[in-house]
Amino acid sequence: MSGATSTRVDAKVEMTRDARTAFEQSVVSRRGFLKASGMLTVGFCCWSAASSVDPVFAQFGVGTAEGSLAPNRVDSWIAVAADGMVTGYTGKQELGQGIVTAQTQLVAEELCVPLAHVTIVAADTARTVDEGYTSGSQSHPTNFNHANLAQAAATARQTLIQLATQHLGVPSSQLTARDGTVIVTGNPSKKISYGELVGGKKFTLTLDPNAPRKSFDQWTILGKPVPRVDIPALAMGTFEFVHNVNLPGMLHGKVVRPPFVGATVGSVDESSVAGMPGLIKVVIKKNFVGVVAERPWQTIQAANRLKVNWNSSVGLTKQAEYYESLRKQSPSRDAFLINSGDVDQALASAATVLKATYFHPFQMHGSMGSSCAVADVSSGKATIWSATQGVWQQRGSAAILLGMNPEDVHVIFTRGSGCYGHNGADTVSYDAALLSHAVGKPVRVQLSRKDEMAWENYGNAYVMDCRAGLDARGNITAWDHETWSPVLGNRPGENRPGNVITGFLAGFEPEPFRAQTPPSQPRGFNNGSNAIPSYVAGCVDDRCGGAGSIRSERVLTHNVVSPFWTGPLRSPSRLQNTFAHECFMDEIAAHIKADPVALRLKYLTNQRVVGVLQAAVHAAGWDARPSSKPQRSAGVVTGRGVSCVAYEGANGYSAMVVEAEVDTASGVVAVKRIVVAVDCGPISNPDGLKNQ
Amino acid sequence: MAAITITVNGAIHTIDLDPTTPLLYALSDDLKLRGPKFGCGLGQCGSCTVIINGQAVRSCITPVQAVNGATITTLEGIGTPEKPHPLQQAFIDEQAAQCGFCLNAVIMTAKAFLDKNPEPTDAQLQQALSNVLCRCFVHVRMFRAIQKAAKEMAR
């Protein structure tokens, strides 16, 4: 619709998405609205004095991805209903980390409304701005910055105050926004509510980058411990996980995965399941095999009985030889992240060279509930209820998988069991989509534990060689870190359905392996994978971004092809590398009989790392002495550990002290105490941070 | 197919289904309950726990024919939003959840145990919950919530 001052529009036919947003919030629930026929008609006006057609508004519907809401429109983020209730629309969704509560606080704070008046709608390709993945600890930096949700709320507050000047007859300088109303400062009886000002209408505004944001000292809702908005429903058993999505006529699907890596379908004997109760269809697409039946148990039984002849494949390397095989594997993608050029020389001239090798296995996400999704693919349209971390990316990649246009695919984030990275959420969404496509009806798929654990994108395995040169007095003169890690697939992005098992089985290739030999050279300091230890200077072309002072430094990484699917799992690579660096620092300290904390402090130059380390050590009551202390070698013995890191180089700082016991008879390790210090910048919800 | 009659949270249901169907599917698919959840399907994690005759039962490995005629309580049935069970209230008060998928397992297992052992030692409580899994690592808060609820329930 245009920005005319008063227009009657047909709700179904003509409303733009943001208008619909305001409409739905003001009149009926969204689900109710969607169920309603096109007979509904609503009148609303655009109040803005400057509501001639705005060129940005004219492009509404074209955001960062095709079909996305425009990120520079207030209406893409904020809707105020007639009763003053506020909805915040965000691309960053709840994975169990508490971000929806934090965003509720953010909207309430910047808009000056009570917390209970704010509801968040997150990650829906038809309703929210494309903010990319919810991953990598980026939700706070994204939505609390000056371009997105926070700035939309601040712009809305500024506008509400300006609007109130007309109603209250005083200039905006004499008005205050408070609890969803604008009041005359010093005379709170003179007021007008947000609902009266804009309720149910659009703002029709561009985000104002200069709209004033509240400073930390003005916060009344942010920075305070706030109960999570979702926990009551979780505790009462009423919360809707994606596992609980239920559509009329919904069928159930089960995948039949290959029995081993690389197996392909020879033949499928459909007669093996003929006549089974409730069976609707056996679905085969290249090497993707699944069954659809009326009820979940029927589906499981049919999948178990279905006779599939699988062609055998190349075998796997023996597990005992696997780590060592990585060092020799070709092709390889090699990169120097740091290379001062003098490390070999420094090690050769060192009084002592210490070496250690650390191994990290492939690790499963192992979410409590195996992954689940519901898809409804019929009449050339697809709707997918998915616990994916990237609804927009899934929209694109599922469209490729289904041979559809992205604009015909609608992905609705629906929470799954705890997500620690790229678990089976995308692949099960593809499973549901392929099976639904085959039967033309909604299909729900929940992976079995085996389906998920055998084929999910595991967290990366690593081999890490550490070497340090010490001079005669025990000073560290050089640090060398070299890693090998296998990779296959990844998040599918918008165009790589083959990056997860379902897409691959259905005939799509994973992202090709990019070989690089000899190693690429660093172009600036980048510690996104924390491969660079905190104790080196991190100098590239005389610009030093590291957290430490050791100048003779080298970090060389190798990626090789994995037999298993891999993808992000909780601090991918950062965890593995940090484990190696911090263990190795302890080895050095033990060798020179130095206190492990003092030795770290000797080489750290980044004051935020120093700060968290000292805070953790202080809180833990650290006993400054070399580790380990002399003690008996039988019975239960005690030990301690310390570590610190500048996460991704400059994306949060943390340190930890752990006290543990080991029963020398049984080998059982018991962690007795963990003290953590975190410097993550401003904290939205202190209790949420503690909970994490 | 067979007609199975179960009483769930006070309501009687007769469901026509394969008698070997695990109880969990009857509860979540036929009765649309959201409390008991599919976690592992192997009886190992506890996500599917319900209470039958005072016992915590893993419904994912319990065929419905084994509970024909039984009275079953699920997480939805132990409290209401207006009057939550002390365990539910304690989990809310202590903010004892991250993803929350395991809350059914923890709360229902704890309830069955506390109903029979109103004043347990910490060690007994830990033992009672040792076969319940939480992957987000909310154990400390959950344990605090259960201890708090135990005191409330014992009053």
Image: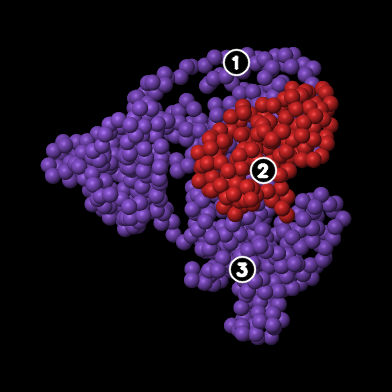
Q: Which chain is red?
A: B
Q: Which residue is mark 3?
A: A111
Query: What's the distance in space between the residues labelled 3 and 2, CA to CA?
Result: 29 Å
Per the model, the C-alpha gap separating discs 2 and 1 is 35 Å
Cβ–Cβ below 8 Å for labels 2 and 1?
no
Q: Residues within 10 Å of mark 1 (few under 14, many from 20)?
A: some
Residue depicted at x 73% and y 38%: B73
Q: Quadrant of residue A427?
A: top right
Q: Which residue does the numbered mark 2 point to in the structure image?
A: A241
Disc 3, SS: helix
Which amino acid type corresponds to the residue marked 2 in the rendered image?
Answer: Phe
Q: Which of pointers 2 and 1 indicates the residue nearer the eye?
A: 2
Residue A577 lies left or right of residue A255; in this view the side is: left
- Of B42 and A320, which appears nearest the observer? B42
Say if labels 2 and 1 share a chain: yes
Q: How many marks?
A: 3
Classify 10 Å Cα crowding around label 2: few (below 14), some (14-19), many (20 and above). many
Q: What chain letter is assigned to the residue under label 2? A: A
Query: How far, Cα to Cα, is label 3 from label 1?
Result: 59 Å
Q: Amino acid at mark 1?
A: Trp
Given residues A296 and B27, the one toward you in this image is: B27
Residue A14 on image: x %, y %: 78, 58
* Chain A as rendered: colour: purple
Q: Which residue is mark 1?
A: A310
Residue A147 in the image: above or below residue A360: below
Q: Position of residue A227 (x, y in %)?
A: 59, 57
Chain hosting mark 1: A
Judged from the image, the secondary structure of the residue bearing numbered disc 2 is loop
